[in-house]
Amino acid sequence: MTIPPIRLLHESLLRRGSDPSSAGKTVAVIEGTVHSYGDLLRSATRLAGNLQARGLRRGDRVAIYLDNSWPAVVSIYAVLIAGGVFLPVNPQTKSDKLAFILDDSGACVLITDAHLGQQFLPLLDGSRLPGGVVCSGECPSHPAVSAFDLAIGPDAPDALQCDVIGLDLAALIYTSGSTGTPKGVMQTHQSMVFACGSLVEYLRLSPDDRILCALPLAFDYGLYQLLMTVSLGATLVLERSFTFPAQVFARIRAEGVTVFPGVPTMFAMLLAAHRKSPLRFEGVGRVTNTAAALSDASVAQLREVFPNARIYRMYGLTECKRVSYLAPELIDERPGSVGKAIPGTEVFLLSPTGEQTPPGEIGVLHVRGPHVMLGYWNRPDLSEHMLRPGRLPGERVLCTHDLFRMDEDGFLYFMGRSDDIIKTRGEKVSPVEVENAMGAIDGIREVAVVGVDDELLGQAIRAYVVLQDDASLSAGQIRALCLRRLESFMVPQQIVIVEVLPRTSTGKVSKRALLASCASGGHLDE
């Protein structure tokens, strides 16, 4: 292995941003404006000083509630330089869920944008966010809110050195759980540095790469595009989203993108555009995919679009970032496989009773390596569910609760999930969270949410809804009401209105029966 010996997550920025030979010349981020590593270090250091002046101390949490943008990039590294723990929050997050994350994490400062004021301003009371809010854009008039531009300006106080070590927390990454409330994955500096180095190694990246990021920085797949870029001294081409593919395609050409990370939804949109008007990006040398497997037919079409690219199939989860990858040279030889463990880690399958699973048989995937999370913030019960005793005394390995088959050569094949978490558009969605939000809609008596296979999304969210006797809601009306309560990726794509929900012998809703067929008397509105 050649993983670089970086002890702390921000040391690569400190080194590159202070190198007089490259700090002002090497481009770190392109987001409309071009920003050098010197720009990034200067802005992040000033914001770090501002955060410390607000009372931030080693280990304190800072919520970053921003779109993919230059302020988001600066904020992540500012928190690290100040000795804090950053927690990225999806900008689609609504007020109730944002309040839960802020309270659960004990965040002392929120860094956000003015256009999200409708969500965060109602949360500003005397006990929450003692360090206040740093806001980019047109700053709202509120005593707790101050301007981002001033926080990175020349009058910002100097940042004090903070003696963080590799075992300290670097990030809390909130992910959906089966309980219906998000849970904060605890990752240390050394676990994230290791994961970053391992990814760089197997993807065969270099400082000359220009990495596209149209995935949310609040999503760990998007976040690591930034972390890998800075660890290499490469360039990140940052897009707000993939909502307007033609705009992204133009940026790929204009900025000379060499690495294209995507999820199945993005690839489906790309290939749909390709079928209408052929696309060809000869400069892209790496195409990476996770969240759900690419079909063989999709891979063949991607080769038309990216004729010079190595295409990577991968599998991972937030609790350890990445588990496995299939070397691109083997993509035809091992159809359907997500490969072997990433460098420096180990995987194995166990039966439900804890015995090693023989080759060819289905078992639960376990992961061993320095990238495994410490656990879930404030949730020792859920941590015990995911972290199991390892081979050494006191060691903990990650139990993914996903079902896999391993062939005689050690290649992994995903067979299904052993819990009910839905993977859609590259995001994890808790059915309970969606059910709770829909159950609060006037006119809905009962709701059950499941995931169904979908070529475009990986899984589509299907909601079975029982209306109250006097209600006359349509599926379209229900969907519109969901958009007020849930992030867009959590809103069901399919709504089935039924008279009753099937039950088990114990009186619980039978989701197995729902998946088998539509309930009698229902109709599907997609």
Image (tube, grey):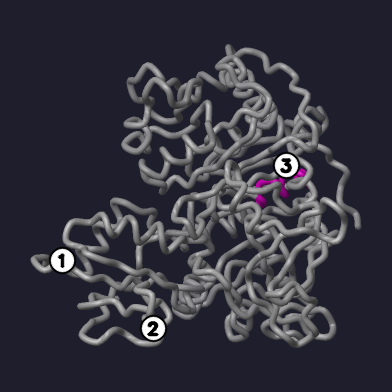
Q: Residue placed at 58% from the left, 73% from the top?
A: 418
In the picture, the disc for residue 513 is 2
Q: Residue furthest left?
A: 470
- Prevailing SS of the magenta stretch: helix
**In the depicted structure, whether residue 502 falls above or below residue 135:** below
Per the image, the residue denoted by label 3 is: 188
Image quadrant containing the N terminus: bottom right
Residue 511 % position (x, y): 40, 76
Q: Is residue 326 left or right of residue 522?
A: right
Residue 283, image quadrant: bottom right
Depth check, front residue: 81 or 204? 81
Residue 304, image quadrant: bottom right
Q: Earlier in the sequence, mark 1 or mark 3?
A: 3
Q: Residue furthest right?
A: 1
Q: Give the magenta-colored segment's residue range.
A: 224-233
Per the image, the residue denoted by label 1 is: 468
Depth check, front residue: 341 or 522? 522
Please state which amino acid type lies under the numbered disc 1. Answer: Gln
Please state which amino acid type lies under the numbered disc 2. Answer: Ala
Crowding at label 3, few (<14), some or many (≥20) Cα neighbours within 10 Å? Answer: many
**In the depicted structure, whether residue 125 falls above or below residue 519:** above
Nearer the viewer's eye, disc 2 or disc 3?
A: 2
Residue 126, image quadrant: top left
Please state which amino acid type lies under the numbered disc 3. Answer: Thr
